[in-house]
Image (tube, grey):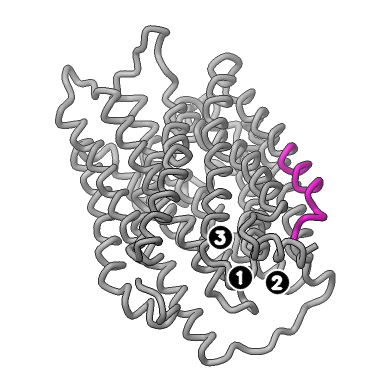
Amino acid sequence: MTNLAATRSSRGAHPTGLAFLAATELAERFSYYGMTGLLALYLVKQLLLPDHAGQVLGLATLRDIFEFRGPLSNQAFASLIFGWYSGLVYFTPILGGLLADRWLGARRTVILGALLMSAGHLAMSFDTTFLAALVMLILGSGCLKGNVAAQVGALYPPDAESLRARGFTLYATGINIGAVLGPIATGSVAALYGWHAGFALAAAVMLVAFGIYLAGQRHFPDAGPRAGRVALPPLTAEERRRTWALIGLIALTIPANIAYPMIWNIGIVWIDQHVDLVSPLGAVPASWFNSVESFSSIAIAAPLVAFWTWQARRGREPGSIAKIAIGSAIVGVAALLFALGCLAATEGRVSVLWALAGFVGMGTAFMWFWPILLALISQTAPVKVNATLMGGAYLSLFAGSTLMGWVGSFYDRMSNTAFWTLDAAIAFGGALLILLLRKPLQRVLDPHRPA
């Protein structure tokens, strides 16, 4: 089946397995973003209030740990929880990659992850098991995320660089469709029936993701090792250079991954507190804004691919590293739109147009840098550590998200304008570093292509 997929890819057609993997991630991201869209508001508006906080197993101990620098407001505590949760979700994929590369293979590891995530989303439906739910979601995501992405890359032959990049863009589009639908659906259910009903919907859709993955098994690449540790030959000197160059590039995306996910944490709270959400049909739930960012990623995908194709025909398409730098800079521009909105606020309320523009900008930035990074790793990482480095890409999101939570804990100590300007400066700094280092990185990764 893998040879058939390679044949189809060599003829310019995307393999059937891509549809199943994209649909799996669509449903998984529906549940993840649906839960994430509720999480920051749920923490601030219910779980951390005295009547609820005492019911959560382990929450008091966690607060004592986080308050090593002094007492925290509920807003700051919520930001740290959000940051560490979203960060650890992206740390564990490297462990999932090692598990797949050395012991279980990608398919079995993904199945384990889907089961853990289903249980975690279900446990979110109860105050008592809130922290246990986060642990299961963190471990489950680690088993699932990097390995699904690695399977996407394995569907294509090594020389199909452009087709693989388009395949990852389509895969990312599936992710974003789920990310659009999730916050709208769970936010609506939570508004009508309560927070826990919204989390229960996320659990049900995660089970759908599990079913889709099982249905597509015969279209996926070989499962890899079945049992027992697999001894791989050591990396050659050239492979070590490529590995370290990719690790360096992953690290350079950390600033963008501090500034970008701030919208899911502080962004939603800021909108709920300061943006005018009144519409002719009533007030719009702030959690819906997570769908705006994802919808813009979907809307920009086809024009962006067409634009890059047009550039490629004329020999003017930016290299992958330059695209990642451009995406990081767009993150900074989007954050500045929030700051400008704060400056232009009238009667203490920010126009919803500023919030919409900023979220659209963030969604556009995502398509410039994240699928391109995954495609570049899939293409250039040594085969011996391919799944591990695909999981390693998520370490950028781990570092970025945990630092995002820390930066976000200062939100209620700064003016809104100053806070979003700081967020923009972090992203611009990352873009500048990538541009400065793109040529030496490119010389190692692919000396025959522009950076």
Residue found 45% across the figure and 48% down from its top: 83
Between discs 2 and 3, the one toward the N terminus? 2
Query: How far apart in space, not on screen, are marks 1 and 3 (Cα)?
Result: 22 Å
Magenta range is 208-220
Disc 1 on helix, strand or loop? helix
Q: Quadrant of the N terminus?
A: bottom right
Query: How far apart in space, not on screen, are marks 2 and 1 (Cα)?
Result: 7 Å
Viewer-proximal residue among 75 and 404: 404
Residue found 50% across the figure and 33% down from its top: 37
Which circle, 2 or 3, is nearer the viewer? 3
* In magenta segment, residue 395: no
Residue 250 image position (x, y, % from top left) = 44, 67
Q: Which mark is residue 18?
A: none
Disc 2 on helix, strand or loop? helix
Viewer-proximal residue among 192 and 85: 192
Mark 2 lies on residue:
101
**233 displayed left or right of 443:** right
Circles 2 and 3 in contact, beta carbons < 8 Å:
no
Disc 3 on helix, strand or loop? helix
Looking at the rendering, which quadrant does residue 257 occupy? bottom left
Mark 3 lies on residue:
163
Viewer-proximal residue among 399 and 21: 21
- Residue density around tag 2, few if under 14, some if 14–19, many if 20 or more, within 10 Å: many
Mark 1 lies on residue:
388
Query: How far apart in space, not on screen, are marks 2 and 3 (Cα)?
Result: 25 Å
Residue 403 image position (x, y, % from top left) = 38, 55
Identity, as a three-letter code, of the amino acid under mark 1 = Thr
